[in-house]
Image (cartoon, rainbow, N blue to C red):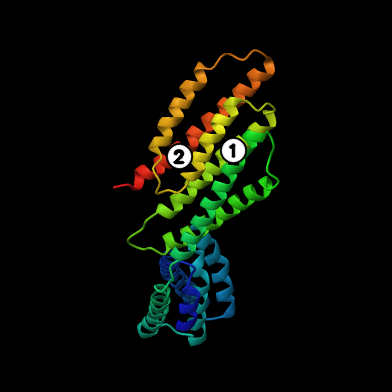
Amino acid sequence: TASIIAIISIQATKSDSIKITIERFFAVLLGMSLFILLSSFLGYEYITLGIFILLFMPLCMKFRIVQGFLVTTVLATHILSEKSISIDFLLNEFYVLILGLSVGNLLNLYMPTNSKIIDSIKLKVDSILKTILIDIAESLRCSCVSVDEDKNFRSLKATIEEGRKFSLLDYDNSLFDKCNQDLNFFSLRRRQYRILTRMRTCFKRLYITHDYSLIIADFILKVADNIEIDKKTTPLIVEHKELKELFSNFPLPKTRAEFENRATLFQLLQEMEEFLNAKIEFKKDYEK
């Protein structure tokens, strides 16, 4: 019984293992008290076990200790087969529980880190982001869309979610020195992904290649070269501000088509500002 308890106590993360251990401990205290009470009135019969299960399951659900239901039921069958209750017997059951839970948690202490996998996924995310930004710049230059646009956006989303999954596992496996930097990294990239999807819709309204388009395209290429977290973003923010001032000083559009095109380009410029600010906010939290 102790070995079975140990096996089912091993979870995907250390945090889950400790949480379930606490649930099972309190479930056993509640369940054994209930079964002893029922046995004193109904005797050590199978009907007693059936009534116990009918009563104990709703209690487990109410107190959110469902993980302890199976272990408690197994220990209850021990009392049923013994057909008596003594202090020594109850202590033995308690020792069985503690032994199983302790060994399970001890085994769960060994959890290999996913840091290498996470670092690899980070590099992949940065590479896809860079490719998408370069494609956006080229689209502004030639008023066309890359044939790999859908593929790159789907790949970016899937890779970000994969990175979040591994980062969450590592976070839950850190009991004392928890660091959510990797989780926040992928949250940053997910935010930037949403910004890129908004930029993507802008191209449906762009049908004129103008000098303004080429200027913004050159700026987006610089952002693509600066995509890595360790690279400084402040110079780009300064340049972005200068671009906005330059944009506002351009001659007013003479036709409706030029006006709509200019408005769309300005929206692209605004989205790039949010894209850069997202990275700056992330770096503020972790730079010493």
Point out residue 265 in the picture as x, y percentages from the top left corner.
59, 27
Q: 145 left or right of 248?
A: right
Q: Quadrant of residue 86?
A: bottom left
Residue at figure coordinates x 41%, y 75% from the top left: 101
Residue 187 seen in the current view: yes
Residue at figure coordinates x 56%, y 25% from the top left: 266
Point out residue 7 in the picture as x, y percentages from the top left corner.
49, 78
Q: Foreground residue, 148 or 16?
A: 148
Q: Which of the labelled discs sits on residue 278, or is there none?
A: 2
In the rendered structure, which disc, 2 or 1, sits on the residue that comes first in sequence? 1
Q: Residue furthest left?
A: 288
Point out residue 263 in the picture as x, y percentages from the top left corner.
60, 22
Residue, disc 1: 137
Dot 1 alpha-carbon crowd within 10 angstroms: few under 14, some 14 to 19, many 20 or more: many
Q: Quadrant of residue 235?
A: top left
Residue at figure coordinates x 70%, y 28% from the top left: 207
Dot 2 alpha-carbon crowd within 10 angstroms: few under 14, some 14 to 19, many 20 or more: some
Q: Foreground residue, 283 or 266?
A: 266
- Foreground: disc 2 or disc 1: 1
